[in-house]
Image (cartoon, rainbow, N blue to C red):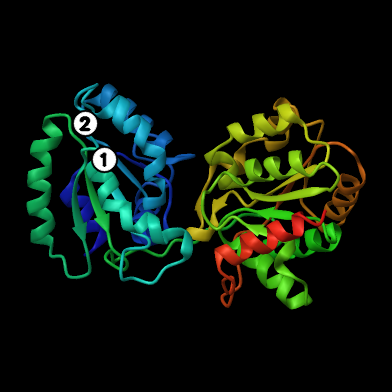
Amino acid sequence: MNVERLVDIIGSDFYTGVPDSQLKALCNYLMDRYGIDPHHHVIAANEGNCAALAAGYHLATGKVPVVYMQNSGEGNIINPVASLMNDKVYAIPAVFIVGWRGEPGVHDEPQHIYQGEVTVKLLEDMDIRTFIIGKETSDEDVEGAMEEFRELLARGKDVAFVIRKGALTGAPSVEYKNGNSMVREDIIKHIVKATGEDPIISTTGKASRELFEIRAANGQSHKYDFLTVGSMGHSSSIALGVAINKPGRKIWCIDGDGAVLMHMGSMALVGTNKPANLVHIVINNGAHETVGGMPTVAGGIDLVAIAKACGYPNAVSVDNFEDLDRELELAGSRNELSFIEAKCSIGAREDLGRPTTTSLENKQSFMDYLNTL
């Protein structure tokens, strides 16, 4: 259905969410109509963050907010939905719009398969009434569902529209860009060159896809890399677990700004433990680029200052390859925790592929390699 029609039917004037490629039509519509406006549209750090922000909006206005997200974010909303918003607690109503990645019978990437199987069940288990919108769903069907939803919302309950692949249309064209010159794939090429045979843990999204293809183009083994294809925001914690248990080898983490923001507490954990063999690299383009380019707040905050405040003894920011190469060499040679922010542009090549090995094959080859160190 047309995304503007969906927005009209829902009738809310406040949206908050974490962007999703399945919901790109909605994300672009909101960016085109509102941009980033704290009174109407906020892109938050994680989905639980969105739910709490929506709750605050309702407390202040008495109106019903909308929270949008990929279904992978359901885990992040469980706590605020169950212990804050549920009608047995504060009865705070909200409309959730959930992109259904990994829908059974629809081909998708491995990280979405199980999440897709339990998407509707998780919502129902949280006492959230659902309505599924597909390509054939009519406006009248959605209007009827929303009429039922309004009765539930009036009683302080939460509801959800689950969006199938390709169900939303009519998205305006929105260009996302910044003023940075370094390209992420080139940054990763420099990292690969500097790290040699050291293990790398890379974040979810295009960064891991680019790392995989760089290894293939170089004729290198994929055994050096753990590709975090799901679990956004947790790569640095995975890297911390590896670094603590492999103290004799330098461990590198390639992270993204959206991922760091999603679970920023992980930086406090890394900084407190201070593994001397860990290098944490955040490639910052200020965007959720993998799912379409919608902005994060990382373009306007000081990640280096945050790293230092979290206890990282070495933290720098670079915006050119000469400085990047120098800092990679220094980080590799020092016996102390290091943080590097690499500022980069938005975008990737159109023919970027996906890993040709399975996630289980990736895990096993990485573990086999770690066992040799």
Query: Residue 218, image x and y in percent?
Result: 78, 75
Which residue is drawn at the image coordinates 55% and 51% (left, top)?
A: 287
- Tag 2: Cα neighbours inside 10 Å, few (<14), some, or many (≥20)? some
Relative to 58, residue 100 above or below? below
Q: Spatial distance from mark 2 to mark 1, Cα to Cα?
A: 9 Å
- Tag 1: Cα neighbours inside 10 Å, few (<14), some, or many (≥20)? some
* Residue that carries the numbered disc 2 in the rendered image: 63
Query: Residue 50, image x and y in percent?
Result: 39, 37
- Is 36 on the left or on the right of 51, as rendered? right
Relative to 130, residue 117 above or below? below
Residue 214 lies in quadrant: bottom right
Which amino acid, by three-letter code, is at mark 2?
Answer: Lys
Which amino acid, by three-letter code, is at mark 1?
Answer: Asp
Residue 61 lies in quadrant: top left
Front one among 69 and 106: 106
Quadrant position of the N terminus in the picture = bottom left
Which residue is drawn at the image coordinates 64% and 61% (left, top)?
A: 364
How many marks on residues?
2
Query: Residue 97, image x and y in percent?
Result: 29, 49
- Is 275 on the left or on the right of 352, as rendered? right
Do tag 2 and tag 1 residues touch (Cβ < 8 Å)?
Answer: yes
* Residue that carries the numbered disc 1 in the rendered image: 13
Query: Residue 120, image x and y in percent?
Result: 26, 51
Front one among 183 and 352: 352
Residue 350 lies in quadrant: bottom right
Residue 262's tag is none
- Is 133 on the left or on the right of 210, as rendered? left
Disc 2, SS: loop
